[in-house]
Image (spheres, helix red, strand yellow):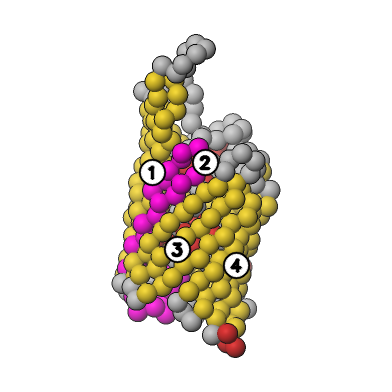
């Protein structure tokens, strides 16, 4: 049975409004947010495609981009996906991600994720001259996700996370979550998605409040068959609005899969202060997929490198 589009829009809008209205983070004052690592992508595929993944997210990566995507691969005979990622980012920033998603018969799916970011060797200075030492900052998110198939065309998902941050001797903790949908539109192959992410609140870090980077992503993805090349082209685009920063970004991504084995990808983020062009690729072999992404960062920020291994069973 097809799910009426009008009813879908009304129910999702009501759910999002309810969650936002009763979230302490959602009613906090405007301004820049903390826990910036929650805005960074967690898969080689996603980063290479500019993180335009709201409609594309599937498997373990969906626990970050859009939890509804854990049920996206309904034609696949494989039911479990594990993703391991390592990212080298700005100024010795390192991010590690471990995620898993399990399809429970095609109607339900559950997922788990561990996302941690570390910045090492930050110099301690209380006066001019040589540094008095160094310290590290650590951010952590541990989460659980659930997805349900509402109809043949509509999937709904939620994620909940425990959050922790440490800077020198100061600590803060709290909880956050996401709600997302994916919809297979009446246009053959065209998928749309929406995610409201980082809803929640944290305790103060010493005397400073830590506001989560509340954001909404909306996007679409469309495949194009390149049968003459034994390939498939996939194009995707997302709009992302950061509520704290009062800023809107656009992300675009493209992927070409050759002979179901080798993948080439490119992406671009418009409106971002730090990111622009990204490139990458991957190789699939039986149960395994290996992906790499290169990100050209703005100004003197350098380059980012992302490595990811996915196991699909």
Q: CA distance from mark 1 to mark 4?
A: 28 Å
Q: Is residue 25 covered in magenta?
A: no
Mark 1, Cα crowd under 10 Å, few <14 / some 14-19 / many 20+, is: many
- Using the rendered image of the protein, determine whether residue 212 is visible from the camera's viewpoint: no
- Dot placed on the residue nearer the N-terminal end, 3 or 1: 1
Which type of secondary structure does the marked residue at label 3 adopt?
A: strand
Q: Residue at x 47, y 60 (%)?
A: 292
Is 157 placed above or below 87 here? below
The quadrant the C terminus occupies is bottom left
Look at mark 4 in the image and give the residue it sits on.
254
Q: CA distance from mark 3 to mark 1?
A: 19 Å
Is 257 placed above or below 205 here? below
Q: Residue at x 39, y 68 (%)?
A: 289
Question: For residue 6, what is the image quadrant?
Answer: bottom right
- Using the rendered image of the protein, determine whether residue 273 is visible from the camera's viewpoint: yes
Look at mark 3 in the image and give the residue it sits on.
291
- Say which of marks 4 and 3 sits in front: 3
Look at mark 2 in the image and give the residue it sits on.
90
Is 107 placed above or below 303 here? below
Q: Kindly indicate whether the residue at mark 4 contacts the one at mark 1 (C-beta within 8 angstroms).
A: no
Is 310 placed above or below 189 here? above
Q: Tell me which segment is drawn in magenta.
A: 70-96
Q: Nearer the viewer, residue 206 or 276?
A: 276
Q: Kindly indicate whether the residue at mark 3 contacts the one at mark 4 (C-beta within 8 angstroms).
A: no
- Say which of marks 1 and 2 sits in front: 2
Residue 75 coordinates in the image, percent (x, y) = 42, 80
Q: Nearer the viewer, residue 157 or 252?
A: 252
């Amino acid at each position: 049975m097809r799910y009426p589009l009008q009813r879908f829009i009304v129910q999702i809008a009501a759910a999002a409004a309810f969650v936002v209205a009763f979230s302490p983070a959602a009613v906090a004052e405007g301004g820049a947010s903390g826990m910036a690592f929650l805005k960074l992508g967690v898969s080689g595929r996603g980063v290479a495609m500019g993180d335009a993944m709201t409609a594309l997210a599937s498997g373990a990566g969906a626990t970050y981009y859009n939890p509804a995507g854990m049920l996206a691969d309904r034609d696949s005979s494989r039911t479990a996906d594990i993703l391991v990622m390592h990212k080298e980012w700005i100024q010795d920033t390192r991010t590690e991600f471990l995620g898993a998603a399990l399809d429970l018969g095609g109607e339900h799916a559950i997922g788990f994720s561990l996302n941690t970011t570390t910045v090492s060797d930050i110099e301690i200075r209380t006066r001019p001259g040589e540094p008095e030492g160094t310290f590290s900052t650590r951010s952590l998110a541990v989460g659980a996700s659930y997805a349900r198939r509402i109809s043949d065309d509509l999937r709904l998902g939620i994620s909940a996370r425990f959050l922790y941050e440490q800077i020198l001797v100061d600590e803060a903790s709290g909880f956050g979550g996401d709600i997302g949908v994916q919809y297979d539109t009446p246009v053959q192959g065209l998928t749309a998605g929406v995610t409201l992410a980082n809803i929640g609140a944290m305790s103060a870090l010493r005397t400073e409040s830590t506001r989560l980077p509340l954001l909404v992503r909306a996007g679409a993805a469309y495949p194009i068959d390149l049968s003459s090349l034994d390939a498939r082209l996939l194009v995707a685009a997302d709009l992302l609005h950061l509520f704290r920063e009062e800023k809107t970004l656009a992300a675009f991504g493209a992927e070409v899969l050759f002979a179901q084995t080798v993948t080439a990808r490119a992406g671009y983020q418009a409106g971002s202060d730090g990111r622009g062009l990204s490139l990458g690729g991957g190789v699939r072999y039986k149960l395994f997929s290996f992906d790499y992404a290169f990100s050209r960062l703005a100004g003197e920020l350098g380059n980012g490198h992302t490595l990811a291994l996915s196991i699909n069973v």
